[in-house]
Image (cartoon, helix red, strand yellow):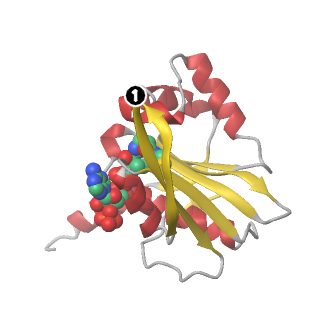
Amino acid sequence: MPDGRPHLQLVEDMPRLRIIEERDAPAVLDAFDDDAMRRQGTIRTLEEARNWVSFMGGRGERLALAIDLNGQMVGAVVVSSIDQENETGWFWYWMHREHRGKGWMSRAAVTLADHALTIMLLHRLELGHRANNPASGGVARAAGFLMEGVEREKFLVDGVRVDVHTYSRLATDPWPETQRLPLDL
Ligand SMILES: CC(C)(COP(=O)(O)OP(=O)(O)OC[C@H]1O[C@@H](n2cnc3c(N)ncnc32)[C@H](O)[C@@H]1OP(=O)(O)O)[C@@H](O)C(=O)NCCC(=O)NCCS
């Protein structure tokens, strides 16, 4: 690295995690304009995107983080359905189509999972992904989740029955080595 610039470029291009804000609505609308996002819900207008952003902001029941690249939201990672009595939460994520495959989702997921299992005092995080969505399984494993089972033919997608792979990560599970992202809360 003769002049250090490649390293500086790498640092600048690493996203950080922060709370989702009102200004993220246009980015959310753009992200949902994607067939691969159909299972995440339908957002077709800026108003629907604003509603989604506003809903995600409800602290207590969930913690929804934006994956922020240079001020722009490029993905989301969320712990929702938090059950304080049983100390559990449901874990999910999405990445804008143009930013997939860079390992950022794995890093975002491990960062939030660590936070949820320590600072938020949860004991068990759960997630499920369609068997035909292997990238989601890759993210789960990179974030320290262990596969628990298969919910056979759980979903009907375009006329085809699809298995769901279920995963969990416990506070007592080994921590994965996946690189963490900065988290600004
Ligand atoms: C699932 C999703 C978040 C993955 O994002 P991503 O940016 O590809 O994630 P990463 O770059 O961190 O890669 C995650 C892992 O999946 C692997 N992967 C990526 N695409 C893959 C593919 N098509 N087939 C198999 N593995 C794949 C990567 O190699 C990586 O595994 P590794 O850490 O063992 O190398 C993204 O595809 C997405 O947003 N999809 C639409 C919404 C969705 O399906 N969300 C999950 C619902 S359960």
| Residue at mark 1: C-beta within 8 A of ligand 1 | no
**Percent x, y for residue 185?**
67, 57
Q: Residue at 38% across / 29% down in the picture?
A: 34
- Nearest the eye: 176 or 166: 166
Residue 93 versus residue 122 in the image, above or below: above
* Farthest residue, direction right: 85
Query: Which residue occupies 35% across, 63% down?
Result: 11
From the viewer's perspective, is 164 left or right of 87?
Answer: left
Amino acid bearing label 1: Gly
Q: Quadrant of the N terminus?
A: bottom left
Give the residue number, with chain letter if any, for mark 1. Answer: 159
Q: Position of residue 9 (x, y in %)?
A: 28, 59
Q: Badge 1 local density, few (<14 within 10 Å), some, or many (20+)?
A: few
How many numbered dots are placed on residues in this image?
A: 1
Residue 20 placed where, x, y %? 62, 42
Query: Height in image: 119 above or below 139?
Result: below
The structure residue drawn at horizontal position 86% and vertical position 63%, both measured from the top left corner, is: 85
> Relative to 129, is 23 on the left or the right?
right
Q: Is residue 88 visible?
A: yes
Q: Element type at marker 1? A: loop
Q: Nearer the viewer, residue 87 or 74?
A: 87
Residue at figure coordinates x 74%, y 66% from the top left:
120
In the rendered view, does 141 fall on the left or right side of 80? left
Q: Position of residue 40 (x, y in %)?
A: 52, 36
The residue sitting at the left extreme is 2
Observer able to see residue 13: no
